[in-house]
Image (tube, rainbow, N blue to C red):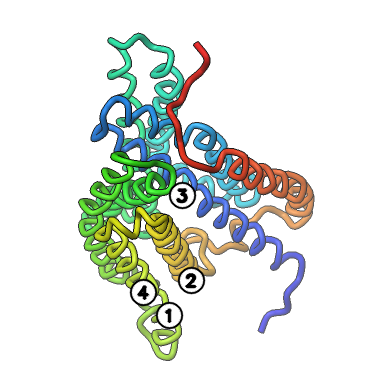
Amino acid sequence: MEQLTLATALPLAFMAIMGLALLAYVVLDGYDLGVGILLPFATDAEKDVMVSSIGPFWDANETWLVLGVGVLLVAFPMAQGVVLSALYLPVTVMLLGLVLRGVAFDFRVKARDAHKATWNRIFAGGSLVTALAQGWMLGAYVTGFQDDLWGWLFAAGIALTLPAAYALLGAGWLLMKAEGDLQRKAAAWGRRVLWPMGLALVAISVATPLVSATVRAKWFVLPELFVLLPIPLACAAAFWAIRHVLRTPRVVEAGYGWIVFGGMVLIFVLAFFGLAYSLYPYIVIDRITVWQAASATESLVVIALGVALTLPVIIVYTIFMYRVFWGKARTLTYGL
């Protein structure tokens, strides 16, 4: 076994920080993207409550995306050149969606009634476009940016699946934050998207080893197969727990709607660790390893000092923010 030194450990540490930051972003910004995707199916009054439920959080949630991409840029310059060059178009589309969401969020509150519906549609459209772009980027990344029919079909499959997963995560958020008719509607929205999302996840799980020989070699060998088996089994258990809660109104009314949100978070976390295992030691699968892509050790030491200062602040602020603004959502007002 190779001896662990600063030169070998620091790239792994930064890879872990980058991965966990992006996971935090997917979970935290995923639910507010999901709420945005569900917005067109609510009444005008319910839309105000839905936007209010994410109002204190949505902008700060994107901090994790900035952290993850920032680590990629400074700690893995070789990889960022390959990744961002291959994903230039979907990254542009994602940023456009995020800008539209940000503009619509503020303008929908201050706009006249005649224009409010337009800003609601822009907010929902920006949320959907952002989710589609992120799904495409993930699919392209997993295939190592294969520029062929199978690579494109795989990326398109994840692009269509991720908005459904975000919508279910958003429905779980509303089960915790909303009351009355909106809470019941959130459960209904969750039921509608549950099976399409679940079947799509199964299809992607089957397709992934087919499009990547590296992934296939890491999962379908013994004894690794038995060690990794708890991941899909836990995902299946989370899926059935979500299904049970969504199909049982009295469970939601008793205050257990959080199980839907928690189950989706568990699925995302398990999928993340499954993907991390599949890719290691590559940062771009089959092309660039973590150590090949990393900056010089001296540079990583300086970067580590900056991360050591900023990361705790982000974590503490995130925890503080959720504690302060926790509770049932009410209609968002700006004191106009």
Please name which of the two marks, 4 or 1, marks the residue nearer to the observer: 4
Task: Please report whichever mark, 4 or 2, sits nearer to the chain's N-terminal start.
Answer: 4
- Disc 3 designates what residue? 26
Mark 1 or mark 3: whose residue is earlier in sequence: 3
Q: Nearer the viewer, residue 238 or 2?
A: 238
Report the amino acid beneath label 3.
Val
Q: Secondary structure under badge 3?
A: helix
Label at residue 277: 2
Q: Left or right: 188 with respect to 135?
A: left
Residue at figure coordinates x 58%, y 39% from the top left: 63
Residue lying at 62% horizontally and 48% vertically, measured from the top left: 71
Give the residue displayed 44% in from the left and 59% down from the top: 262
Judge the density around disc 1: few (<14), some (14-19), many (≥20) Cα neighbours within 10 Å. some
- Picture coordinates of residue 280, whole percent (x, y): 51, 69
Q: Which residue is mark 1?
A: 228
Q: Measure the alpha-carbon separation of dots 1 and 2.
A: 10 Å
Q: Can you identify the residue that label 4 sits on?
A: 232
Measured along the vertical axis of the image, is residue 158 above or below residue 86? below
Which is more toward the observer, 326 or 275?
Answer: 326
**What is the distance, in whole Å, between disc 4 and disc 1 at their CAs?**
8 Å
Disc 2 element: helix
Q: Quadrant of the N terminus?
A: bottom right
Q: Are marks 1 and 3 in contact (CB under 8 Å)?
A: no
